[in-house]
Protein backbone atom coordinates (compact mmCIF):
# COMPACT_ATOMS: atom_id res chain seq x y z
CA UNK A 1 0.00 0.00 0.00
CA UNK A 2 1.16 3.53 -0.70
CA UNK A 3 1.80 5.80 2.27
CA UNK A 4 1.25 9.53 1.96
CA UNK A 5 2.87 12.01 4.32
CA UNK A 6 1.10 15.12 5.48
CA UNK A 7 1.61 17.92 2.94
CA UNK A 8 2.89 15.46 0.33
CA UNK A 9 1.56 15.28 -3.23
CA UNK A 10 1.72 11.79 -4.70
CA UNK A 11 0.74 11.12 -8.30
CA UNK A 12 -0.32 7.61 -9.31
CA UNK A 13 -0.06 7.09 -13.06
CA UNK A 14 -0.89 4.14 -15.27
CA UNK A 15 -3.46 2.96 -17.78
CA UNK A 16 -6.91 1.39 -17.91
CA UNK A 17 -8.22 2.90 -14.67
CA UNK A 18 -5.45 1.42 -12.53
CA UNK A 19 -4.47 4.74 -10.93
CA UNK A 20 -8.04 5.39 -9.76
CA UNK A 21 -8.46 1.88 -8.36
CA UNK A 22 -5.24 2.16 -6.35
CA UNK A 23 -6.16 5.66 -5.16
CA UNK A 24 -9.52 4.41 -3.90
CA UNK A 25 -7.78 1.56 -2.05
CA UNK A 26 -5.42 4.04 -0.39
CA UNK A 27 -8.34 6.32 0.56
CA UNK A 28 -10.30 3.41 2.06
CA UNK A 29 -7.36 2.61 4.35
CA UNK A 30 -6.81 6.24 5.38
CA UNK A 31 -7.78 7.28 8.88
CA UNK A 32 -9.12 10.80 8.72
CA UNK A 33 -11.40 12.86 6.55
CA UNK A 34 -11.00 12.25 2.81
CA UNK A 35 -12.01 14.69 0.09
CA UNK A 36 -12.71 13.17 -3.30
CA UNK A 37 -12.76 14.85 -6.69
CA UNK A 38 -14.21 12.29 -9.11
CA UNK A 39 -13.35 12.19 -12.80
CA UNK A 40 -15.07 14.85 -14.81
CA UNK A 41 -15.05 17.20 -11.81
CA UNK A 42 -18.62 18.39 -12.15
CA UNK A 43 -19.89 21.61 -10.67
CA UNK A 44 -23.50 22.40 -9.81
CA UNK A 45 -23.97 24.57 -12.88
CA UNK A 46 -27.12 26.39 -11.78
CA UNK A 47 -25.58 27.36 -8.43
CA UNK A 48 -23.21 30.26 -7.92
CA UNK A 49 -19.56 29.74 -7.09
CA UNK A 50 -20.32 30.64 -3.45
CA UNK A 51 -23.19 28.14 -3.31
CA UNK A 52 -20.97 25.40 -4.77
CA UNK A 53 -18.42 26.10 -2.04
CA UNK A 54 -21.12 25.96 0.63
CA UNK A 55 -22.07 22.48 -0.59
CA UNK A 56 -18.50 21.39 0.14
CA UNK A 57 -18.86 22.41 3.78
CA UNK A 58 -22.31 20.88 4.21
CA UNK A 59 -21.23 18.30 6.81
CA UNK A 60 -19.96 21.11 9.05
CA UNK A 61 -22.67 23.66 8.26
CA UNK A 62 -23.60 24.15 11.91
CA UNK A 63 -20.07 25.30 12.78
CA UNK A 64 -20.35 28.66 11.09
CA UNK A 65 -17.04 29.93 12.43
CA UNK A 66 -15.09 26.97 10.99
CA UNK A 67 -16.90 27.22 7.66
CA UNK A 68 -16.21 30.97 7.46
CA UNK A 69 -12.52 30.38 8.21
CA UNK A 70 -12.32 27.71 5.47
CA UNK A 71 -14.06 30.00 3.01
CA UNK A 72 -11.53 32.75 3.76
CA UNK A 73 -8.68 30.28 3.13
CA UNK A 74 -10.25 29.04 -0.09
CA UNK A 75 -10.83 32.60 -1.32
CA UNK A 76 -7.20 33.43 -0.58
CA UNK A 77 -5.96 30.32 -2.39
CA UNK A 78 -8.35 30.81 -5.35
CA UNK A 79 -8.69 34.59 -5.89
CA UNK A 80 -10.20 34.06 -9.35
CA UNK A 81 -13.08 32.14 -7.76
CA UNK A 82 -13.48 34.77 -5.06
CA UNK A 83 -13.89 37.40 -7.80
CA UNK A 84 -16.63 35.27 -9.34
CA UNK A 85 -18.43 34.24 -6.15
CA UNK A 86 -21.85 35.37 -7.41
CA UNK A 87 -21.39 34.02 -10.93
CA UNK A 88 -23.17 30.79 -11.85
CA UNK A 89 -20.74 27.90 -12.06
CA UNK A 90 -21.90 26.85 -15.54
CA UNK A 91 -20.50 30.10 -16.96
CA UNK A 92 -16.93 29.44 -15.74
CA UNK A 93 -14.27 28.13 -18.11
CA UNK A 94 -13.34 24.44 -17.91
CA UNK A 95 -10.18 25.23 -15.95
CA UNK A 96 -12.09 27.48 -13.54
CA UNK A 97 -14.70 24.75 -13.05
CA UNK A 98 -11.94 22.28 -12.16
CA UNK A 99 -10.54 24.77 -9.63
CA UNK A 100 -14.05 25.17 -8.20
CA UNK A 101 -14.40 21.41 -7.78
CA UNK A 102 -11.04 21.35 -6.00
CA UNK A 103 -12.00 24.33 -3.80
CA UNK A 104 -15.35 22.70 -2.97
CA UNK A 105 -13.53 19.54 -1.82
CA UNK A 106 -11.21 21.64 0.35
CA UNK A 107 -14.23 23.22 2.04
CA UNK A 108 -14.83 19.82 3.67
CA UNK A 109 -11.49 20.12 5.54
CA UNK A 110 -10.03 16.79 4.39
CA UNK A 111 -6.69 15.45 5.63
CA UNK A 112 -6.33 13.57 2.33
CA UNK A 113 -7.53 14.84 -1.04
CA UNK A 114 -7.98 12.30 -3.84
CA UNK A 115 -8.25 13.64 -7.40
CA UNK A 116 -9.22 11.26 -10.21
CA UNK A 117 -8.17 12.29 -13.74
CA UNK A 118 -8.00 15.96 -12.76
CA UNK A 119 -6.14 17.04 -15.89
CA UNK A 120 -8.54 15.43 -18.38
CA UNK A 121 -9.53 17.98 -21.00
CA UNK A 122 -7.45 20.78 -19.51
CA UNK A 123 -4.87 22.79 -21.40
CA UNK A 124 -1.44 23.77 -20.07
CA UNK A 125 -2.59 27.05 -18.42
CA UNK A 126 -5.35 25.27 -16.50
CA UNK A 127 -3.01 22.46 -15.45
CA UNK A 128 -0.51 25.06 -14.20
CA UNK A 129 -3.26 26.79 -12.19
CA UNK A 130 -4.35 23.46 -10.71
CA UNK A 131 -0.75 22.59 -9.79
CA UNK A 132 -0.29 25.98 -8.14
CA UNK A 133 -3.48 25.48 -6.13
CA UNK A 134 -2.25 22.11 -4.85
CA UNK A 135 1.22 23.26 -3.79
CA UNK A 136 1.50 24.23 -0.16
CA UNK A 137 -1.84 22.71 0.83
CA UNK A 138 -1.93 21.61 4.45
CA UNK A 139 -2.97 18.04 3.65
CA UNK A 140 -1.90 14.98 1.71
CA UNK A 141 -2.87 14.93 -1.96
CA UNK A 142 -3.24 11.82 -4.09
CA UNK A 143 -3.54 12.40 -7.84
CA UNK A 144 -4.76 9.44 -9.92
CA UNK A 145 -4.17 10.26 -13.57
CA UNK A 146 -3.32 8.58 -16.85
CA UNK A 147 -1.42 11.68 -17.93
CA UNK A 148 1.85 13.01 -16.54
CA UNK A 149 1.24 16.75 -17.00
CA UNK A 150 -0.06 17.48 -13.49
CA UNK A 151 2.40 15.03 -11.92
CA UNK A 152 5.29 16.84 -13.62
CA UNK A 153 4.03 20.18 -12.35
CA UNK A 154 3.10 19.36 -8.77
CA UNK A 155 3.95 15.88 -7.45
CA UNK A 156 6.58 15.25 -4.82
CA UNK A 157 6.49 11.56 -5.71
CA UNK A 158 5.29 9.55 -8.71
CA UNK A 159 3.97 6.00 -8.50
CA UNK A 160 3.55 3.95 -11.67
CA UNK A 161 1.11 1.03 -11.67
CA UNK A 162 1.17 -1.58 -14.39
CA UNK A 163 -0.92 -4.77 -14.51
CA UNK A 164 -2.14 -4.15 -10.96
CA UNK A 165 1.35 -3.78 -9.47
CA UNK A 166 3.35 -0.80 -8.31
CA UNK A 167 6.39 -0.91 -10.60
CA UNK A 168 7.85 2.47 -9.66
CA UNK A 169 7.61 4.65 -6.54
CA UNK A 170 10.16 7.45 -6.57
CA UNK A 171 10.65 11.18 -6.05
CA UNK A 172 9.39 13.15 -9.06
CA UNK A 173 12.75 13.99 -10.64
CA UNK A 174 14.00 10.42 -10.31
CA UNK A 175 10.74 8.97 -11.60
CA UNK A 176 10.69 11.26 -14.62
CA UNK A 177 14.10 9.87 -15.64
CA UNK A 178 12.74 6.30 -15.58
CA UNK A 179 12.13 4.95 -19.12
CA UNK A 180 8.87 3.30 -18.02
CA UNK A 181 7.34 6.77 -17.85
CA UNK A 182 8.44 7.56 -21.38
CA UNK A 183 6.53 7.40 -24.61
CA UNK A 184 3.58 5.48 -23.16
CA UNK A 185 2.53 8.47 -21.07
CA UNK A 186 2.92 10.94 -23.88
CA UNK A 187 1.15 8.90 -26.58
CA UNK A 188 -1.30 7.09 -24.32
CA UNK A 189 -0.07 3.56 -25.13
CA UNK A 190 0.84 1.20 -22.28
CA UNK A 191 4.40 1.01 -21.01
CA UNK A 192 6.66 -1.63 -22.43
CA UNK A 193 9.33 -1.72 -19.70
Image (spheres, rainbow, N blue to C red):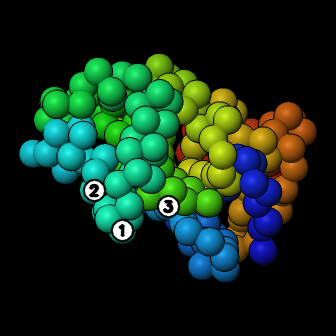
Q: Residues within 10 Å of mark 3 (few under 14, many from 20)?
A: many
Marked residue nearer the N-terminal end (3 or 2): 3
Q: Residue furthest front?
A: 65
Residue that mark 1 sits on: 59
Residue 55 circle label: 2
CA separation in Å, label 2 and label 1: 9 Å
Residue furthest to the left in view is 46
For the point 32% across and 65% down, which residue is it?
A: 62
Residue drawn 58% across and 28% down?
132
Q: Residues within 10 Å of mark 1 (few under 14, many from 20)?
A: few
In depth, the one of 69 and 97 nearer the eye is 69
Per the image, label 2 sits on a secondary structure element best described as helix
Q: Is residue 102 visible?
A: no
- Left or right: 58 in relation to 29: left
Residue in front for this viewpoint, 14 or 97: 97
Can I make out residue 94 in this image? yes
Mark 2, other Cα within 10 Å: few <14 / some 14–19 / many ≥20: some
Residue located at (50% from left, 30% from top): 77
Q: Quadrant of residue 26?
A: bottom right
Outermost residue to the bottom: 29
Which element is circle 3 on? strand
Question: Is the residue under label 1 in contact with that under label 3 (CB below 8 Å)?
Answer: no
Helix, strand or loop at disc 1?
Answer: helix
- The CA span between labels 3 and 1 is 12 Å
Amino acid sequence: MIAIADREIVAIVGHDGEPARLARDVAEGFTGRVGHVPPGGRVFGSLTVAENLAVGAYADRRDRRAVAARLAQVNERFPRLAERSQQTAATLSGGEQQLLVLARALMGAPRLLVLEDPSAGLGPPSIAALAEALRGADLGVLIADEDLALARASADRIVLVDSGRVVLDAPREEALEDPRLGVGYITGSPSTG
